Amino acid sequence: MEVLSSHKLLFRLCLLLPLRITSLLLLSSAYSPPDNYFINCGAHSNTTVDTRVFVADRGFLVGKGETVKNSNSSASSSPLYQTAKIFKHPSLYRFDINQDGTYIVRLHFFVFLSHTDLSVARFNVSVFGLSLLTNYSFRNVTISSPKIEEFLVTILKGEFKIYFMPYETSTAFVNAIEVFLGPESFIPDKALHITSQGAKRNYSGLSSNSKVLHKVHRIDVGGSTSKLDELWRNWDPDDDYLQSPESETYDQYKGGTPYYEPERINEYIAPAFVYQTARQFKDSNSNSSLPKITWSFRVNKNSNNFLRVHFSDVVSPTPNDLWFNLYINRNFSKEINPYSIAERMGAVPFYIDFVVDSDGLGFVNASISRVEDSRIHNAFLNGLEILEVVNESGFSPPEIELGKKKLSPAKIVPACSGAFFILVILVALGLKFRKPGHDKILGVPLYGGFSSDSRSTQRGRNACLAPSLNLSLRVPFSEIKRATKNFNEKLLIGEGGFGKVYKGTLNGRKVAVKRSDPRHGQGLEEFQTEITVLSHIRYRHLVSLVGYCDERREMILVYEFMEKGTLRDHLYHSDDNYERSTSVSELSWEQRLEICIAAAKGLHYLHTGPAGGIIHRDVKSTNILLDENYVAKVADFGLSKSGLPDPDNITMGVKGSFGYLDPEYLTTLQLTEKSDVYSFGVVLLEVLCARPAIIQSSQLDEVNLAEWGMLWRKRGQLEKIIDPVLVGNIKPSSLRIFGDTAEKCLKAFSIERPTMQDVLYYLSYALRLQETGMPREPFEDSTTTTITSLELQFPVVLNFPVHEDDDAPIVGDDSSDIEVSEV
């Protein structure tokens, strides 16, 4: 009864402990990895498997996943295979790594019976640019046979992400994930490289973070059953791999306990049971000149394979002068003399590492044989491990159908370059021959600039407005004429893609009147969208629609007048070719942060407000306007997409402005709120650097602001490209957080970007650091701060503290403003 009570107490304690499993949960294991995760995907509670406690995947999954349950729970005795998480869209699991080292990563897959046919799943799995599994499927897997893929990954301190990418229209799934730190010196930095010609040289970098080792085979030579060691690695018997003719005699041997020399080897390299069994030749005079025992292993063709060969002399009844040959792929041999390696006689384990090229047919072969003319005929082997070296195979997202052509996002998205980068350059160069336009206007949003949307829809003779438009906002054409003094040219304040913009006075209120011109390419669709969006929302940081007019084939929009014009007007001057920009800003860093915060509030309200979710689709510095007090408001909703985003809805028309376009949207045509987040990241760099999103330059890395800014960010020298006006006026801590925020917004994959809510939080923090100079550490102590009117749904983006009780949604009034204050 006492034992039972202890187990119950341990179970309750496990529920109260943090999700990170500590060594306290590995009480019966000699190895307690200091940094580890055991995840049961789709489960709602902890699951104990031998000495490991697997926790639910909540808090680790980023992206959308559906939980499926095993409808035939008796089909598997393991509790890990009762649930799975399936993915129809790219998703990832994210883990915080606290210590550099070689980690063991295992992925568990079990095709069980459920309402979803898991057997047809087909997907890729990747980590930091390397493909762990490519076009992975389960065509030859029986329903009672789980697949466990194991990897050795060198991970540096920080975030570690495992991506699951469904292939085309298929799905991805996973049942369980293990990530835990392996023992020190688990993998060498260098090993002898054996090429297909038998050449020998050093193969370096095996333990660098650019290499991943994928376990292919792990063999207990002479063993009779599969066994798990203390690192939960599975060792299989070698019977299925023996290729020696029956005429070549050998014994299966089992000896006593091996003696580990601590300075040379420990039990985590290979367990005692591996060194207790062996295959050996009989000590007899053989008629064969050099009989061999051979093991053959199937590997990928043209692959590099890490081969570890294990020895321990458990075969000799008494110590003697023992040596023999080890052969690899018939073109390499090495004499093995155990007593020249081990420091003592007897069962002393040791191992030798190689990197071996495949023989071209997809095999790695290992053999042992006695040395020619030797009186000692004994030759033995205890264990073999083969792991494929995963080199720079690249990130492997699914192919996306674009009309009749297929385009692989892997070539474009990860670095925001490739074809997209070439497209940006071509467009930027083409602008040199564009007629001068008037993007710069005072106090009103303009279409145009470098918009990629053709916007060719025109209002035809029989076209009519959508019946859902707010008729109370209609303004008679006669009043529009009176407000603008019959569209007096002296009141013209700008001209853009939609048409001309006039300053006016309507019912005693200053307004901006935007009049459509069919020659400018804007059409009925944008006109209706703008009215529909702005007639349903009203918020301090969104430009208000005063009215509209659709009389006499006119399309006219009337807005509140924004006295200080666009944000870009206050950052830099630029000619129409965008060749170079000149900083003209008189805005302080505090003012710029306040403007960014206000714009972020407006976008956050769009994404989460009572209108049901709106994607702006054209966030840029010319669509952020400033009133007489420099309060920022987001404008220009002609391209907005109303309603909650539908992950299955792919639009075929790319709309937005070059330099601000989300690269993932360009390749997948999938529009989400994270597309606005990317564009806002470009705006943040505009604010910091005072230069356009796209310029002409002989230096290709300067053309695109996002790429240029992140290049300097990775160098740790972001301060070298800031607006000269700001030099010496930004506190380093504020700049660091601002740079972190921009970098997160500009992640190539949307699932890695923060929400606008998170962006708002970080910008508020950057402003506070600038104003108070408070160091970062006190802020990260959750006992010293409080956040009001802010809900951080997934706050690990920048590893800042989270206050889960602050869940009040932001609403459409001033009370939703965020304040960070001392307790």
Image (cartoon, rainbow, N blue to C red):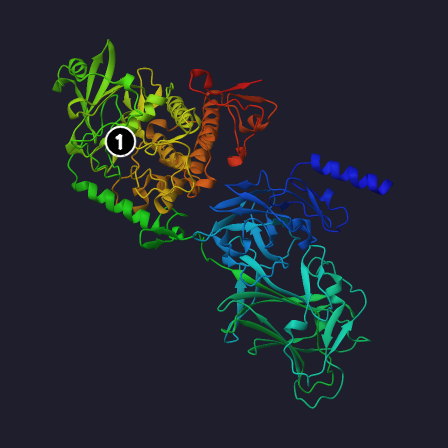
Of residues 480 and 76, the one drawn nearer to the viewer in this rendering: 76
Count of picture labels: 1
Locate residue 263: give its quadrant.
bottom right
Residue 570: percent from the left, percent from the top? 29, 25
Residue 317: percent from the left, percent from the top? 82, 76
Q: Is residue 381 above or below residue 581?
A: below
Give the residue furthest to the bottom: 287
Give the residue furthest to the top: 508
Of residues 552 and 686, the one drawn nearer to the viewer in this rendering: 552
Of residues 179 and 352, the one drawn nearer to the viewer in this rendering: 179
Q: Is residue 464 left or right of residue 708?
A: left
Q: Is residue 677 left or right of residue 63?
A: left
Tag 1 residue: 526
Q: Is residue 668 above or below residue 314?
A: above
Locate residue 497: give its quadrant.
top left
Locate residue 799: give its quadrant.
top right
Residue 53: percent from the left, percent from the top? 69, 45
Q: Is residue 746 left or right of residue 254?
A: left
What quarter of the picture does the N terminus occupy? top right
For image coordinates 42% across by 38% down, the residue present is: 646
| Residue 713 in sight here | yes
Q: Is residue 62 above or below residue 526?
A: below
Q: Amino acid at mark 1?
A: Glu
For image coordinates 12% across by 18% down, the residue present is: 488
Q: Secondary structure at mark 1?
A: helix
Residue 767: percent from the left, percent from the top? 45, 24
